[in-house]
Amino acid sequence: MADGVKPRVKAPKKAAAGEAVTLKTLISHKMESGQRKNKDGSLIPRSIINRFTCEFNGKSVIDVTLEPAISTNPYFEFEAVIPEAGELVFTWYDDDGSVYSDSKKVAIG
Amino acid sequence: MKFKQMTAIAALALALPTLSLADADDDKLVINGELELVTKTAAPAHLDGALDEIMSGWHFRDDQTQAMEMDDFDNPGMLGVEAALDAWDTVDGSEGKSCASCHGSAEESMKGVRAVYPKWNEAAGEVRTLEMQINDCRENRMGAEKLGYTSGDIVNMVALITLQSRGMPVNVAIDGPAQATWEKGKEIYYTRFGQLDLSCASCHEQNYGNMIRADHLSQGQTNGFPAYRLKNTKLNSVQDRFKGCVRDTRAETFKPGGAEFTALELYVASRGNGLSVEGPSVRN
């Protein structure tokens, strides 16, 4: 696992049924491209987040493939329609096999 | 015919008022939809004859970059603040103390601190920056190793301390015992350095609002520091930025943490007296 990785999500606690809400996510991550070298000249192994997904009650909201050109601390902002009360699950997949996730409950009201 | 057209176009171009693309805009900086900051105000008295109005560098950035600073969630500088919050409570050094052991919660004890720094320290008999003060605490009270003057850890800590003063006007003292240091900083500000023969004033006083190659020249205010720069994706300290500027004039730079840059930091901060403390800001 890379150092200092922490997922963050901003989602409303409440939404009207059928409302499209804005979700913001940011994960602190180095996004090591695999092109850089150490002081001793050896290659720093690639470690980027290659996939990001968001699910609502098991249904896919968004599924993103990330490439090495994407910046440090990748940030996503997108909308999701909330048909019923439930839980949003956000997952980030790292090249090194680590999986980071966060979840937010959304109530109807 | 063709020649006539060309001259007509040239004449038209000359007749148009010269609109500079890099001018400061008139947007309002409101953070999280609630905290409105002073980003333009009358220049402090000591700038009489040099500048009429002082402006935060925020006005010189484009709308997308500005928007990142208007919401703490979007501001990547807050990642540094979070890291520093952990460090604040972490015991380090031979005395078994953390920052919190003496200072309690940063939200209370550090309120208003950044607004008056760099500041004269009576016991040490010198003007001190926040970084110097942090390292003094670490060495003498915690018995811990000093942090590198522009290292990530210390910049994060400065960002945490700065955040507690956000919205308060910058108000560094330039008279009394700090005056000699301030005069020295002023002299450096107006001295030309490097093969390009540029002083700070050449760009930031005489040419703010113009382009320098592909970038916009601001007034070089330090109220937004530490600044998260999109170009290097980290928080940058004031003196690190000074170093970058002096290097760009193709001069040997002063050492961050040295007497010259500390004097300059005090002087440049005083040029922003009246602007809100804005850090950690987002710049490109």
Image (cartoon, coloured by chain):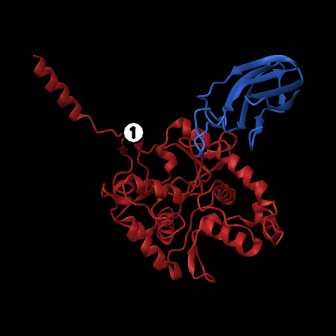
Chain colours: A blue, B red
Given residues B244 and A55, the one toward you in this image is: B244
B32 displayed left or right of B37: right
Q: How many marks?
A: 1
Viewer-nearest residue: B87 or A94: A94
User: Residue placed at 54% from the left, 74% from the top?
Assistant: B173
* Secondary element type, mark 1: loop
Residue A61 point in image, percent of width and height = 77, 18
The kind of residue on which mark 1 rests is Ala
Residue at 74% across, 50% down: B82
Q: Is residue B127 left or right of residue B106?
A: left
- x and y percentages locating residue B120 in the rendered image: 58, 77
> Which residue has dot 1 on it?
B214
- Please say if B150 is above or below A58: below
Q: Output the chain of dot 1.
A: B
Across and down, in percent, residue A63 comes to 74, 19
Determine which quarter of the picture holds residue A50.
Answer: top right
* Left or right, B67 with reference to B221: right
Residue A11 position in % (x across, y down): 78, 32
Q: Residue B97: name its quadrant.
A: bottom right
Local packing at callout 1 (Cα closer than 10 Å; few below 14, some 14-19, many 20+) is few
On the rendered image, what quadrant is the C terminus of chain A found in? top right
Residue B50 as seen in the image, left or right of residue B220:
left
In the picture shown, does residue B52 fall above or below B80?
Answer: below
| Image quarter in which the N terminus of chain A is found | top right
